Amino acid sequence: MTQSARSAPHVITACYLGWMLDSFDFFIMAFVLNDVVRSFHVSLSTGAWAITLTLACRFIGAILFGRLADRFGRRPTMMANVLCYAVLELLSGFAPNITIFLILRALYGVAMGGEWGVGASLVMESIPARWRGMVSGLLQTGYPTGYLLASLLFIFEPAIGWRGMFIAGSLPALLVLYIRRSVPESPDWLARDQTAHTASLGAVLRGNAGLAVFAICLMMGFNFFSHGSQDLYPSQFLSRLHHLPHATVTTMMIIFNIGAIIGGLAAGTLSQRIGRRWAIGGFALAALLVIPLWIFSDGLVRLAIGGFLIQICVQGAWGVVPAYLNEISPPAIRATFPGTVYQFGNLLAAGNANLQVWMAGGFGSIAWAMAVVTGGAAILIALLVALGPEARHIRMGREMVEPAVPGR
């Protein structure tokens, strides 16, 4: 077994934890939104900007940290990235007013935006080709697992308060020690010459303009798909609309995220056999069948089943994304391209929370707003991916990448 093969589990573990803890920090905001609004004596619409600004600023981080990773390597950039978002999460817990709080959440968005692209490129360049589908699903399940951790931390929110939730969110800083000790640099990055490391982002994107536009539009749909079904679900749908108590909301969110984890693993693994596009499109369209049960049910059991199933579909489709975007990416900017198109799409979908609050006023219910956004996003994803490229057998790295074998 080569050194690269022996180190692959450490690379997977570190990048999975990086995205999981990033998600954990982000979704703390979804749980404490109502408390933050009350603490700073502002409207829900004003408080929702904390989510919107985080999502919008992720685009900046994707470019910044992606370029650093393409120039100086994936490993040191990821360490800096994790440390930045952990420190900003800690500072959020000490914000004295809503203005400082919103600024910190925007800066947190910059740090959050860099982690996914850098981590995904490091993983995909460091594992055998036959692992990509399964590892893609595993990597993406870090997102709902982080949401699940935030759900569990929310159990203690009455005791520690919303500020204590953010302070606890600084623990990911410890991950830097593990990366420094156990994670090697990407063999793909090491194999390239200095010219490749300094390739012009603008020049490469101009040469792949059609691909970039396609990927940005696809990721806009994906971000409306996930954030449309998640961001306001605990605070506005479960707590405000259904008047569920704190303990019940926590239980529902645990069930919700178990479904997401199952979906990501299943779809990522399945995509290795049937192709990335079929897996993404199939899980996206399945969500249309689940939406009525998920959002218009009465009773805890039906609500729980609906939440479980919708997240199998949403995170199932998402589970294929790390592999898909890295495979279609221009090699010279692989740390920058996936994260940048992901976060540019995220920027276009950043107003989701405010949009849904506005739509709820028109529909008279947050349920209809969530159903329309999530269903519309599912249709957009299915249509775009049907027209897009498939690059499942592309080669990355050196000795770690096996020749493409049709049907694998």
Image (tube, rainbow, N blue to C red):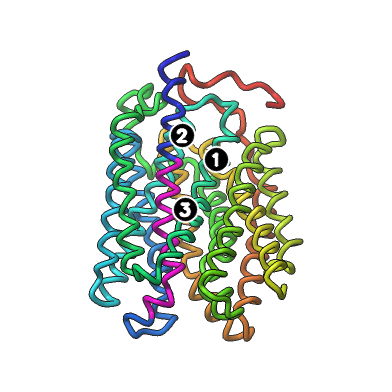
* Quarter location, residue 43: bottom left
Q: Establish if 67 lies above or below 168.
A: above
Q: What residue type is labelled 1?
A: Leu
| Residue 138 image label | 1
Spatial CA span between label 3 and label 1 = 13 Å
In the picture, measured across the screen, residue 237 lies left or right of residue 159, that is right
Dots 1, 2 in contact, CB < 8 A: yes
Residue at 62%, 22% (x, y): give it: 404
| Residue under numbered circle 2 | 12
Spatial CA span between label 1 and label 2 = 9 Å
**SS for callout 2:** helix
Magenta stretch encompasses residue 35: yes
| Residue under numbered circle 3 | 146
Residue at 60%, 43% (x, y): give it: 320
Question: What residue span does the magenta drawing correspond to?
Answer: 16-37
**SS for callout 1:** helix
Give residue 27's position: percent from left, percent from top.
45, 61
Depth check, mark 2 against mark 3: the one in front is: 3
Q: Which residue lies furthest to the top in this view?
A: 1
Dots 3, 1 in contact, CB < 8 A: no
Spatial CA span between label 2 and label 3 = 16 Å
In front: 211, or 404?
404
Going from N to C along the chain, the mark reached first, 1 or 2, is 2
